[in-house]
Amino acid sequence: MVKEEVCKVKLMQLNCWGGKLGTQLQRLIAEEKPDIVCLGEATDLAERPGSVLDPYRKFLPEADYPYDIFAPAFSYRYMHELAGLGNAVVSKFKIESEYIEFVKNHFMEDIDSVDSDDYNNRNFVHATIKTDKGLINVLTHHGHHSPHGKDGSVENTEQILKLTDYIDKLDGPIILTGDFNLHPNSKSLEPIHKTLRNLPTEFKLKTTRTELAKREEVIDYIFVNDDIKVLDFFTSNILVSDHKALILEFDLVN
């Protein structure tokens, strides 16, 4: 009998908190060595000495991660320039194609959260990535922050339905990641559960928050379809944000 060759790929998902703890994030990347990194609250900003925000490219150097997509939800004035904040996918493997779609509002430039009627802009990123065993669909999304809490709302559900309508049209292996701002039993997550596996639930995670959040709750996720063979799934204990980093090691089902 010929032993099936395992092609292990490591993916990391993290709400990186705008890069406030960039040095720690560099340590995490060096220790885990992920092949693909999905980021929420990623900041695109020119490096400035003494800045309290680090651009996501600072801790994911291009030499190691030559491919990336950045999808800002909005930009804001910071130290006499515009800083973008949004979702990013960074990869050691080639990104063959990319797609960005807003599920609420649209990109807003130089936003003022005080004067804006609603700056809760939300999008998702879809990267088609060429691994050694074939193409995979990697999507990341930062969910709507509902004033009603993490149980979800009509607004959350509407946005999730836009996301799942898109995912339902995809073929092949699918990985969906992100800080969804929803508890696992939220009704707003039910459309995702119809087609994808919820790994934090399967692996019985108690929290995806850190001590900086001063609460325990699961609101960060990696979902996969049946074309993904899960080899391992865990959270990192390195403090890099008010959210924990989620780590998925996987192969593709032949």
Image (cartoon, rainbow, N blue to C red):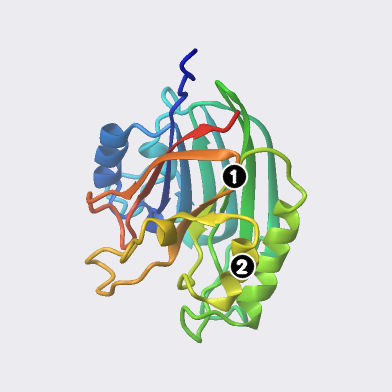
* Residue at the disc numbered 1: 226
Amino acid of disc 2: Asn
Taking the view exactly as shown, the residue that stands out farthest to the right is 169
Horizontal and vertical percent for residue 34? 39, 34
Q: CA distance from mark 1 to mark 2?
A: 31 Å
* Residue at the disc numbered 2: 121
Taking the view exactly as shown, the residue that stands out farthest to the bottom is 148
Horizontal and vertical percent for residue 234? 33, 49
Q: Nearer the viewer, residue 54 or 146?
A: 146
Residue 173 tag number: none
Q: Earlier in the sequence, mark 1 or mark 2?
A: 2
Taking the view exactly as shown, the residue that stands out farthest to the front is 1
Residue 164 falls in image quadrant:
bottom right
Q: Residues within 10 Å of mark 1 (few under 14, many from 20)?
A: some
Amino acid of disc 1: Asp
Circle 2 — which element?
loop
With 164 as the anchor, is 92 left or right in this view? left
Horizontal and vertical percent for residue 119? 59, 73
With 140 as the anchor, is 204 left or right in this view? left
Can residue 13 be seen from the camera position used here?
yes
Q: Quadrant of the C terminus?
A: top right
With 6 as the anchor, is 244 left or right in this view? left
Residue at the spot 28% in from the left edge and 52% down from the top edge: 240
Circle 1 — which element?
loop
Examine the rendered structure and indicate whether residue 226 appears above or below residue 199: above
With 92 as the anchor, is 28 left or right in this view? left
Examine the rendered structure and indicate whether residue 2 appears above or below residue 51: above
Q: Nearer the viewer, residue 175 or 240?
A: 175
User: Mark 1 or mark 2: which is in front?
Assistant: 1
